[in-house]
Image: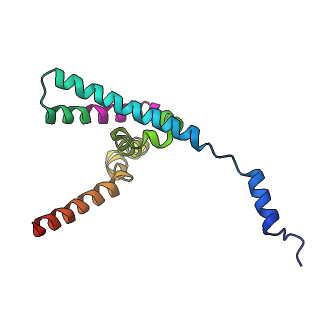
Amino acid sequence: MDDTYIGKEKYKEMVKETAPKSKTTANSFRAFIVGGGICVIGQIIHNLCLSAGAGRDSAGTYTAVVLIFLGCLLTGLGIYDKIGKFAGAGSVVPITGFANSVSAPAIEFKKEGYVLGVGAKIFVVAGPVIVYGTISSIIVGLIYYFTR
């Protein structure tokens, strides 16, 4: 028998001792606080639009545009990455996370030029999401249309 063989039980023990401890509770709390904070900021923007006289649909559109702009701006300034490291999934779920996923590759590949860098890489992450959403909406629309 080989001397390097240590056995299943001993291996499980070694893994348990050396594996980093899970911080699920702390990570969940940070994700909840940051994701909720982003949503609160969105609600404040929405309420400001409504109080300025915008209709409900227009206020929703303005809110989305402002949040996307803020997500791209913070990504460009390098701040969104820090928020993401702190909050984890809490920074990915809201609309600002999608803005980050579109603008980050564009910024990263800017040095390769506007066509082959920004143009080619801008939808690396977001492209499949957009395609899946579009195809899914077409299928659901057809099912709805033919079953009515």
User: Can you say which quadrant of the picture contains the C terminus?
Assistant: bottom left
What is the magenta range?
A: 66-79
Q: Residue 127's quadrant in the figure?
A: bottom left
In the figure, 92 relative to 5: above or below? above
In the figure, 148 relative to 69: above or below? below
| Point 71% across, 51% down: residue | 19
Q: Position of residue 102 (x, y in %)?
A: 35, 45
Left or right side of 104 for 21: right
Which secondary structure type mostly characterizes the magenta part of the structure?
Answer: helix
Total marks in image: 0
In the figure, 103 relative to 137: above or below? above
Q: Residue 80's quadrant in the figure?
A: top left
| Point 40% across, 30% down: residue | 37
Q: Nearer the viewer, residue 30 or 62?
A: 30
- State the colouring used for the structure image: rainbow
Residue at the limit of the structure toward the bottom, as seen here: 1
Magenta highlight on residue 103 = no
Left or right side of 80 for 61: left
| Point 24% across, 32% down: residue | 63
Q: Nearer the viewer, residue 121 or 80?
A: 80
Q: Where is residue 58 in the image (x, y as percent from the top left)?
A: 15, 33
Residue at the limit of the structure toward the top, as seen here: 52
Q: Where is residue 138 in the image (x, y as percent from the top left)?
A: 19, 62
Q: Nearer the viewer, residue 132 or 20?
A: 20
Left or right side of 20 for 26: left
| Point 46% across, 31% down: residue | 79
Magenta highlight on residue 76 = yes
Q: Nearer the viewer, residue 27 or 100?
A: 27
User: Can you say which quadrant of the picture contains the N terminus?
Assistant: bottom right
Q: Position of residue 4 (x, y in %)?
A: 86, 69
